[in-house]
Image: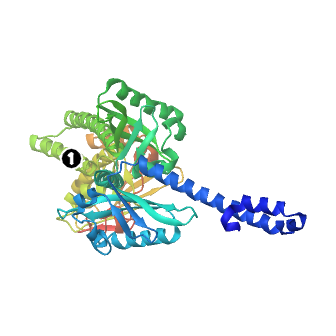
Amino acid sequence: MLAGVGLVGCLLAIAAEGPERWLGLPCLGALFYLAMLRTSRVKQALARSEEGFRQLVDLPVQATFITDAGGHLVQISRRWEDWTGLDFARSAEPDWIEIIHSEDREVVVRGWREAVASGQPYDQSFRLRMADGEFRWFRARAFPQPDADGLISRWVGAVEKIHDKRVAEDRLRQTANLLEMIGSSTPSIIYAKDRDGRMLYCNRALEELTGLGSADMLGKTDAEWNPNLAEAEVLQATDRLVLASGATQDLEEVFTGGDGKARIYQTLKSPLRDRSGDVIGVVGVSTDISAAREAEQREKLLSRELDHRAKNLLAVVQSVVSLTRAETLPDFKAAIEGRIQALGRAHSMLAASRWEGADLERVLVEELAPYCGNVQSAVTLTGPPLLLKPAAAQSLALVIHELATNAAKYGALSVTAGELEVRWEVTDGALLDLRWEERGGPPVKPRTQGSRRGFGSRLIHSSIERQLGGTLRLDWAASGLKAIMQIPLDRSVAVPTQPAGEAGSGGHGGAEPGSSDLVTLPR
């Protein structure tokens, strides 16, 4: 009876037969509940189906298809055949699977079968072989359609051609990857900002300089991520200049890195334009030129130093020429040449060190070497490695030359049995103590009180006392001349030089200049 008259009719019939029949109402209530639940599920399924249809209608549909509940093709539009060359009969499995690109085939088939089994909407992108043999990108979507009982009766779907869009996305992705590789490969800083100064892109060089990640800077202005606000304002001002002028600006900028060190950058900033040519921001490339600027500054200082030294050297040469005295012209010429050559040797050593200084031992060796080649006298040099300042090197070169010339004419270097010892050390009183001691030479005639000094003596006193601010004591003992020179370190010594094994310069008598070992020049 229930099947014939329906639920409402059944209830009316029971009520007419008497109260005793109402005992079956609990069962009827359960049936009523199940009927309502089933109706609700059907409505929900219909709602999902309607939503799927709405989405399908909203698509730029180019080819549609219908399958049965098991996912087998029932109907497909003519456009499918136009694309693939497959008619309805050949569009069933396995023919339609064969035209899917081999790299996409397994994923597509598995996704479709999982959707059919679960009843969930299907959505996948893949490549299909066209009638001309070329592969194109497509997107397929399908939605389950329930019947009145809420069971899936069929699937309705559409295939959308997305090849141009997918190719454009791939090219964009490749371009982004290429930009990332370029940005990561260059030591220069590359960045882009919008018109409000917010960072759109920055490469690895900027991350390494700041110690920040790109996430800390993207979407923020310089003032928001740079702790140096004054510096950030200068950078933003040049950005605004580019935006206002619409022209590329070539300028120098100072930026302080995460290590606290300020660096100088050569920056090219250009307007960032969209396809229509409108300026939408700023793009910049900054190269660290700090080392180059420091080198330029050193060159300028060196140039000024060379100019100063050249003028001083010329003044010394003029003084040497004007004050030199000799009984004959050849003697005058020899004296002049010897003194100028001494200055020249000191100048060469200074030039080799870029005027940073000259090694004291090397100065002694260079000035004494001309007087030790043809005699059997022994010359020993003992002292620690010291680098003389340029002015001290020139002055001491003249002093050593005068002492050596005197020893070669009248002292220890004039006889085969003569000996010369030169020692130097740094005293606790911040003095360079340099001692010259001759032995075994001809007897020295003592200087009398008030006797007139020769040019050599005057030159030695002037160099040590006036030019270097030191003291000089000459002891004309019978055994040989002793000279004790003490010069303030701040006027004479730059820095200690390297030990023998590190200096790398040529040796003299088996030892390196600048070593602290005893050096003996050949007899």
In which quadrant is the C terminus drawn? bottom left
Residue 495 sits above or below residue 502 on the image = above
Residue 305 sits above or below residue 3 on the image = above
In which quadrant is the N terminus drawn? bottom right
Residue 406 sits above or below residue 462 on the image = below
Residue 116 position, x and y percent, is 47, 69
One can see residue 164 in this view: yes
Q: Which is more toward the observer, 102 or 359? A: 102
Residue 477 position, x and y percent, is 37, 55
Q: Which is more toward the observer, 295 or 439? A: 295
Using residue 441 as the reference point, say whether residue 147 is left or right of it.
right
Using residue 245 as the reference point, say whether residue 81 is left or right of it.
left
Colouring of the image: rainbow
Mark 1 closeness class: few <14, some 14–19, many ≥20 residues within 10 Å: some
What residue is shown at x 53% (from left), y 34% (from top)? 229
Residue 450 position, x and y percent, is 36, 38
One can see residue 518 in this view: no
Q: Amino acid at mark 1?
A: Gly
Q: Which is more toward the observer, 163 or 27? A: 27
Label 1 sits on residue: 344
Which residue extends farthest top?
A: 244
Mark 1, secondary structure of its residue: helix
Looking at the rendering, which quadrant does residue 132 occupy? bottom left
Residue 286 position, x and y percent, is 35, 42
Which residue extends farthest front?
A: 17
Using residue 399 as the reference point, say whether residue 235 is left or right of it.
right
